[in-house]
Image (cartoon, rainbow, N blue to C red):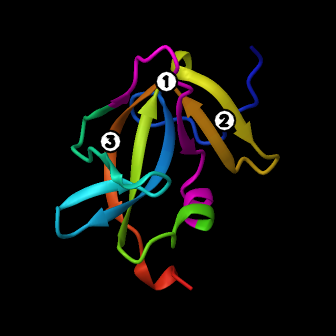
Amino acid sequence: MKLIKICQVSNKNNLNLGYKAVGWDSEKEQAYSLHGGRGMPIDIGIGSIMENNSPNFHGFFLGSTKQYVTDYYSGLTDDKELLLTYEFDDQDIIGNFNHENCDGEIRVKKAKLIAVEELDSSRKD
């Protein structure tokens, strides 16, 4: 499988980086998927592994840059939003959907959460 280059691929561990915006349910004190809603909780413990071993699993989508994620996925909820940073190995890449300017999505089998930051709520329209 030939992969289109991933533009932001290095961190101190020499692993690839990917990003995900999630909502924050302040009543439950729980992060949730902006795609799946409050019914899809997301573990935001640093070091937690996002993984699914189901045979019908098609991968997790991560943005290739912080800017791509904030431009296309931020503002999908009235709740507070968080930006999650994951690291992953080349062998965990299932698909790569980068555009020429390096913004796009990466589909991975598993990834490790390495950072959580609050997104700026003033970005919402």
Dot 3 corresponds to which residue?
A: 114
Which of the two residues, 25 or 119, is positioned nearer the viewer here? Answer: 25
Question: Does label 3 or label 1 sit earlier along the sequence?
Answer: 1
**Could you tell me which residue is drawn at 52 percent across and 67 percent down?**
74
Question: Does label 2 or label 1 sit earlier along the sequence?
Answer: 2
Residue 2 in percent (x, y) is at 77, 18
- The image's mark for residue 109 is 1
Which of the two residues, 57 or 74, is positioned nearer the viewer here? Answer: 57
Q: Please, is residue 85 above or below residue 59 in the view?
A: below
* Label 2: element kind: loop
Q: Nearer the viewer, mark 3 or mark 1?
A: 1
Quarter of the view holding residue 25:
bottom left
Instruction: Name the side, left or right, on which 26 lies relative to 108.
Output: left
Instruction: Name the side, left or right, on which 12 lies relative to 19.
Output: left
Residue 124 in percent (x, y) is at 51, 82
Question: Does label 2 or label 3 sit earlier along the sequence?
Answer: 2
Q: Quadrant of the C terminus?
A: bottom right
Which of the two residues, 39 or 93, is positioned nearer the viewer here? Answer: 39
Q: Is residue 64 magenta?
A: yes
* Label 3: element kind: strand
Q: Amino acid at mark 2?
A: Ile
Disc 2/disc 1 C-alpha distance (Å): 16 Å
Disc 3/disc 1 C-alpha distance (Å): 16 Å
Residue 75 in percent (x, y) is at 51, 73
**Could you tell me which residue is drawn at 40 percent across and 24 percent down?**
52
Within 10 angstroms of label 1, few (less than 14), some, or many (20 or more) residues? many
Which segment is the magenta one? 50-70
Q: Amino acid at mark 1?
A: Lys
